[in-house]
Image: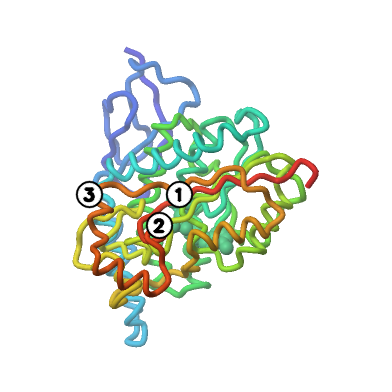
């Protein structure tokens, strides 16, 4: 049986398994041998997955020195670290579910964009706004043959662990950089690699074009992109008019953008990870639904612009972009049951409509006018 030798340099002795072929030998370093019965092609990406115990060991190896340097006034960041460890545990436990979720978001955005595209995805120049850490849309766009770039204020640059660490150390301090590094290695990278395999993106993640950039100051020439996507970003944007102007400038005439928001007035709109998964779906926990609009006992350290449905619509209408489609996704049966008459009365008195309270997810398809 033919065998393929791979140059594989782990940091130290790692046990590994691959998602392609069967592992026929494990070495401390150097070559990793897999059989080629499944027709592995030259240049095909091999996904090597670290075993759970190895990750744990590596995690502590990097985390402990960071924890030792935390001073009393760093109490809050230390809490942040603990939260991160809880988040990682949960995400790794629900890895398959998370993967399916990320894949379904990506499929949905592409499906909603499809009728508005001016050219086939293959070869299109695409921008994913707020590509984040798991990079689901960026991987999906590249898998479809787009020449895609992802931008984010705080992205995960695959394979550039020390650049990621030092940037965050500069911007947010040691504890925040350590938390992010652990999360990147233990969760984001793992999900990104699996997603790439599932979506058929055959290059290594580090070949993705990811840049640190603010969407309200895009460093691209006018009329660059054939399409833009964004997933769970528009509730975080501070300068909406400036952002819409920049999107208009960088899109080619007639080109569409799919802008998604996880709405603030929805029951998980406070972005508390103790009660929601990454799609804003309720996963139980002790925090009450709509806590952020009521007692507000559990604040989270992310910026939220608090825009309501009607305000998003008005901002688009006031911008140079055209609104091509509006998808305010209807609530599920279980979402409907959460809005008791008591909560509805209390929150409508604060100016939220029933639709505001029951709409978690909004996709806005905008387009640069042909003559724009
Ligand atoms: C909830 S995350 C979503 C990430 C990714 N789209 C995903 O679905 O996994 C929101 C992202 O938006 C980014 N973001 C917020 N404001 C931004 C801005 N003005 N410019 C670029 N990115 C921004 C944040 O850094 C964060 O990574």
User: Mark 1: which secondary structure?
Assistant: strand
Distance between the Cα atoms at labels 1 and 2? 9 Å
Residue found 61% across the figure and 35% down from its top: 116
Give the labeled residue for mark 3: 93
Q: Is residue 21 left or right of residue 52?
A: right
Whether residues under marks 2 and 3 lie with C-beta atoms below 8 angstroms apart, the answer is: no
Quadrant of the image containing the N terminus: top left
Q: Nearer the viewer, residue 228 or 253?
A: 253
Residue in the foreground of this view, choosing between 208 and 351:
351
- Expressed as whole percent of the image width and height from the top left, the position of residue 348 reads 37, 69
Q: Is residue 133 left or right of residue 314?
A: left
Label 3 or label 1, whichever comes before in sequence order: 3
Picture residue at 39% right of the left edge, 16% below the top: 39
- Residue 227's tag is none
Residue 161 showing in the rendered view:
no
As measured in the structure, the alpha-carbon distance from the residue carrying label 3 to the one carrying label 1 is 31 Å
Identify the residue position indicated by label 1 in the image.
328
Label 3, residues with CA under 10 Å away: few <14, some 14-19, many ≥20: few
Under circle 2, the secondary element is: helix
List x then y, in percent, for residue 211: 59, 54
Residue under pointer 2: 355
Number of residues whose C-alpha sits closer than 10 Å to that of mark 2, classed few (under 14), some (14–19) or many (20 or more)? some
């Amino acid at each position: 049986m033919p065998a393929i030798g791979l140059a594989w340099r782990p940091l130290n002795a790692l046990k590994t398994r691959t998602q392609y072929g069967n592992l026929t030998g494990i070495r401390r370093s150097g070559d990793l041998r897999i059989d080629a019965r499944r027709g592995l092609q030259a240049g095909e990406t091999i996904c090597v997955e670290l075993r759970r115990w190895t990750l744990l060991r590596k995690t502590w190896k990097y985390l402990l020195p960071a924890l030792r340097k935390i001073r009393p006034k760093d109490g809050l960041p230390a809490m942040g670290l603990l939260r991160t460890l809880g988040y990682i545990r949960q995400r790794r436990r629900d890895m398959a579910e998370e993967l399916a979720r990320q894949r379904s978001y990506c499929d949905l955005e592409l499906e909603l964009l499809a009728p508005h595209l001016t050219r086939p995805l293959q070869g299109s120049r695409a921008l994913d706004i707020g590509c984040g850490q798991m990079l689901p849309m960026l991987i999906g766009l590249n898998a479809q043959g787009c020449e895609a770039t992802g931008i984010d204020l705080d992205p995960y640059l695959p394979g550039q662990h020390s650049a990621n660490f030092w940037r965050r150390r500069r911007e947010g301090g040691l504890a925040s950089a350590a938390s992010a590094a652990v999360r990147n290695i233990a969760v984001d990278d793992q999900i990104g690699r699996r997603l790439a395999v599932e979506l058929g993106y055959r290059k290594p993640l580090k070949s993705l074009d990811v840049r640190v950039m603010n969407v309200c100051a895009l460093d691209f020439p006018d009329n660059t992109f054939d399409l833009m996507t964004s997933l769970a970003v528009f509730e975080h944007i501070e300068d909406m008019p400036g952002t819409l102007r920049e999107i208009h400038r960088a899109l080619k005439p007639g080109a569409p953008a799919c802008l998604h928001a996880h709405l603030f007035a929805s029951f998980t709109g406070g972005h508390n990870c103790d009660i929601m998964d990454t799609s804003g779906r309720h996963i139980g926990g002790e925090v009450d639904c709509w806590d952020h609009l009521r007692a507000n006992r559990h604040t989270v350290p992310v910026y939220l612009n608090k825009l309501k449905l009607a305000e998003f619509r008005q901002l688009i209408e006031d911008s140079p972009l055209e609104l091509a489609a509006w998808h305010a996704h209807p609530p599920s049966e279980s979402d409907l049951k959460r809005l008791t008459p008591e909560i509805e009365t209390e929150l409508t008195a604060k100016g939220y409509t029933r639709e505001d309270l029951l709409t978690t997810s909004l996709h806005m398809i905008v387009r640069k006018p042909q003559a724009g």
